[in-house]
Amino acid sequence: MQALSAAGINWLRCDFSWAIIQPVDAAHFTWATTDVVMKAAAQTGMNILAIIDYCTPWASSKGVQTGDAKFFHPTNNSDYANYAWAIVNRYGPGGAFWSAHPEFVPRPLTAVEIWNEPSAYFYWLPEPDPSDYAAMALAAAKAIKSASSQVKVIVPADIYESRNDGEGPTLWGRSVFAAQPTLVNYVDAISVHPYPSSVCPDPLDDTRNVDQGFYGKALVARDLVMNQTGRELPVWITEVGWTTATSTSIGVTETNAATYTNHALGRALQDNGTAQPYRPAIDMIFLYKYGRSNGVMTDAQGNYMLLRADGMAKPAWSEVLKYV
């Protein structure tokens, strides 16, 4: 947070893991980890986008406390809603954490995201289910707003599901709001993760199908939700980036990653003379991610970071700083 703040960046997306906050049962909370996060946020002037995820084992619908139980939806949505309420009640505006620490200039939570990528089977086992997610999201959104009406609720609304059963793609975001029509009344923005397809890695490439194009994905997601709900919600891009693991099928060179990062930020934050201006449709953008890569060129996940394994900045970091 100190490094980001010194660079002029003041937003960070961070997991507020249910399994860490309520590891035992519904009656007991463990705040040590998230207290450290919020203390650091106050000390550095950082705004935190809290991801309220994933399931804690005791509440998992899998019913067995094994490693992947956290990626199953909760048995009782009321348990998840209580956890969401408790986070905002503690760290939101006027929250208990700030009252207990008058030595800090408060930097309360002002936005929370309900789960990470529930449209993907690997984060919503055994397969994504927009109806189940929508019911959980509605319960959580109501609880969040009851704790603080000032905290924005962000709901993931990527275009398609990512399934493991071979069934055809379902229009995820539209299906979520169709399943619970009143959800839109509690939502302040939708989030998308428009990672580039292998045929369209450059954000300025508009020659492909619109749902393959980088920001085409964001605008199509917005329009599908708007057509379903009658409301045009702002889009938060809460993850996007390029891995420099060049021995993988999706890896790009550091030079190309820098170019694409520049184009992504430019397109999100400026008009760029495009036929479809992306501001103000896109309200926020978060890059995945700040930190050190591991330098293993066969590991895609380990090399999205903006720093090399030795801690030196990749060229993409210089492109980020141009937009601060």
Image (tube, helix red, strand yellow):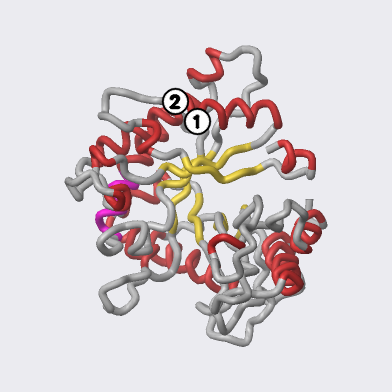
Q: Which element type, helix, strand or loop, lies under badge 2?
A: loop
Q: Is residue 181 visible?
A: yes
Principal SS element in the magenta part?
A: helix
Task: Note whether 315 is above or below 208 in the view shown.
Answer: above
The tag on residue 31 is 2
Q: Position of residue 19 (x, y in %)?
A: 35, 38
Q: Amino acid at mark 1?
A: Thr
Disc 1: CA contacts within 10 A as few (<14), some (14-19) or many (>=20): some
Query: The N terminus appears in which quarter of the rendering?
Result: top right
The answer to whether 189 appears left or right of 260 in the picture is: left
Q: Is residue 107 above or below residue 206?
A: above
> Which quadrant of the figure has residue 174?
bottom left
Q: Position of residue 102 (x, y in %)?
A: 61, 12
Bounds of the magenta segment: 130-138
Q: Say whether marks 2 and 1 touch (CB < 8 Å).
A: yes
Magenta segment includes 76? no
Q: Is residue 311 above or below residue 161?
A: above
Was residue 131 drawn as part of the magenta stretch in this picture? yes
**Is residue 271 in view?**
no
Number of numbered markers: 2
Alpha carbon distance from label 2 to label 1: 6 Å
Q: Residue furthest bottom?
A: 207
In this view of the protein, which residue sits in the foreground, 152 or 202? 202
Crowding at mark 2 (Cα within 10 Å: few <14, some 14-19, many 20+): some
Residue 263 vs residue 78: left or right? right
> Which amino acid, by three-letter code, is at mark 2?
Trp
